[in-house]
Amino acid sequence: MDDLLVCGGLVVDGTGAAARAADVRVRGGQIAEVGSGLRPDGERVLDASGAYVTPGFIDIHTHFDPTVFWDPLCDPMPQHGVTTVLVGNCSLSLAPARPEHRKSLVELLCYIEDLPSEVLDASIPWGWESYGEYLAATEKLGGFAVNMAGMVGHNMLRTYVMGERPPCQPPLASTRTGTNGRFPAARPTTPNWPRCSTCWPGTASSFSSSRPRPAGRCAGMCSGWPI
Ligand SMILES: [Zn+2]
């Protein structure tokens, strides 16, 4: 790894200490020295004037588990200073997954990420069922631009064990009538989304492009996603 001297930046070291002007020397991939007026010692020098110099950020909620198969650079995470991403913490992961559950999983991911399913169909080298087999598939990529830590999605675990159950409650009629047209009709390439952490994955058969999107939030789904 290149040795580096980062000069002239404002260092925010992540300890809670106040920002301070300092130079940072990196040797062998590790911080070797932090101080003022550090002199170059044969390393590559990076002028950080006007910029913050910080530890890498950790994004604790991403869906890069499929993305790495078509974008191992994990764009735009590095540009944002993110050096570690966490996947699977909102219930979704690419494993464990039986072959008959892949389609529903792809539909879900495409809806959340607003991606055409063709991208995932063409990019994900399905062949695994267990989480370990999924990890082995990612290791064949030869590394990513960021560190990736994975959690086993509880929805996938439940589906793997219990299968796609029928809905356990009426299809959210009260919330459907309460939307008052605030939400647009579902996009044609993605399923309308009546699912919640209680019902999913049992509502896979109830997709409807004409059903209004229910109001409220699904506590077990992608946080912040209104359904
Ligand atoms: Zn999520």
Image (cartoon, grey):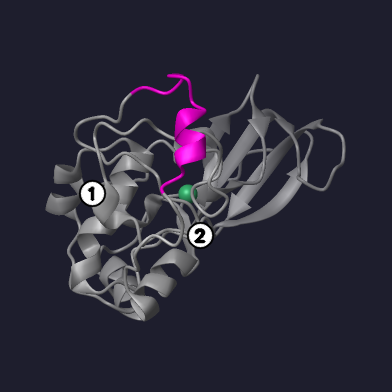
Mark 2 highlights which residue?
198
| Residue 1 sits above or below residue 77 on the image | below
Left/right of residue 166 with respect to residue 33 in the rendered view? left
Where are the magenta residues, as a range? Answer: 171-184
The kind of secondary structure element at disc 2 is: loop
Left/right of residue 90 with respect to residue 213 in the rendered view? right
In x, y percent, where is residue 34?
A: 75, 45
In x, y percent, where is residue 164?
A: 32, 68
Q: Earlier in the sequence, mark 2 or mark 1?
A: 1
Mark 1 highlights which residue?
70
In x, y percent, where is residue 75?
A: 37, 39
Q: Main secondary structure of the magenta part?
A: loop
Residue 65 or residue 144, whichever sits in front: 65
| Residue 47 sits above or below residue 143 on the image | above
In x, y percent, where is residue 157?
A: 42, 73
Residue 75 or residue 225, whichever sits in front: 225
Left/right of residue 175 with respect to residue 193 in the rendered view? right
